[in-house]
Amino acid sequence: MSITEAAAAAMPLDRTTMLAGAARLLADGGAALSDAEIDTLRLQLRGHIELLIPAVESAAAHLPVGGVEGTRVRARLIAARSALGLGWPGDSRLVRLSVVVKLARSVRSLCGQLERLGDPDHLHGRVADRVGSHLG
């Protein structure tokens, strides 16, 4: 069964799960991950970012273009989109690991931004309660 884009957009994001996966990776830098785990995590984190970007854009739509907060949000969105473009088939293990760390940081950044914006349509799992909140 496939859901429509509109139905997917209406569902709350499970940010607690998203952040838990990112925190586990960021806690130790992923050194203990197998190649298969790196690839799985890369796909998972990319999917999280693809869901978070439109949610953050929607929550930030009211911010003025030249304002400080609007500029911060746009910078985080640009960084997240850039992270989605990283990595190529055949990259070394070190490069693939670097890519998943960047993706995890983008997930953490976008989840935090969504909470700061107070998006009521996507507040499932509070960032303050996340695993790994000590990571900054």
Image (spheres, grey):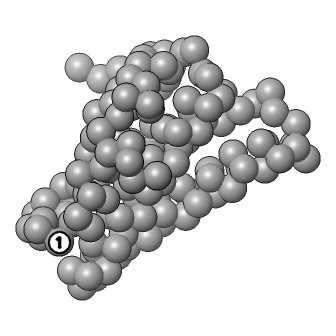
State the quadrant of the N terminus.
top left
Q: Which amino acid type is shown beneath numbered disc 1?
A: Ala
- Look at 38% across and 48% down and name the residue there: 134
**Could you tell me residue 106's position as x and y percent?**
48, 54
- Look at 54% across and 15% down and name the residue there: 121
- Look at 60% across and 21% down and name the residue there: 119
Residue 38, visible in the rendered structure: yes
- Look at 58% across and 60% down and name the residue there: 79
**Could you tell me residue 54's position as x and y percent?**
57, 35
Q: Which residue is mark 1?
A: 31
Reply above or below: 74 against 18: below
Reply above or below: 121 against 84: above
Residue 66 vs residue 91: left or right? right
| Structural crowding at the residue carrying mark 1, measured as other residues with C-alpha within 10 Å and reported as few (<14), some (14–19) or many (≥20) | few
Toward the front, the furthest residue is: 134
Residue 44 vs residue 34: left or right? right
Q: Secondary structure at mark 1?
A: loop
Residue 18 vs residue 75: left or right? left
Residue 58, visible in the rendered structure: no
**Could you tell me residue 120's position as x and y percent?**
57, 14
Specify the quadrant of the image occupied by residue 38. Answer: bottom left
**Could you tell me residue 20's position as x and y percent?**
28, 41
Reply above or below: 105 against 67: below
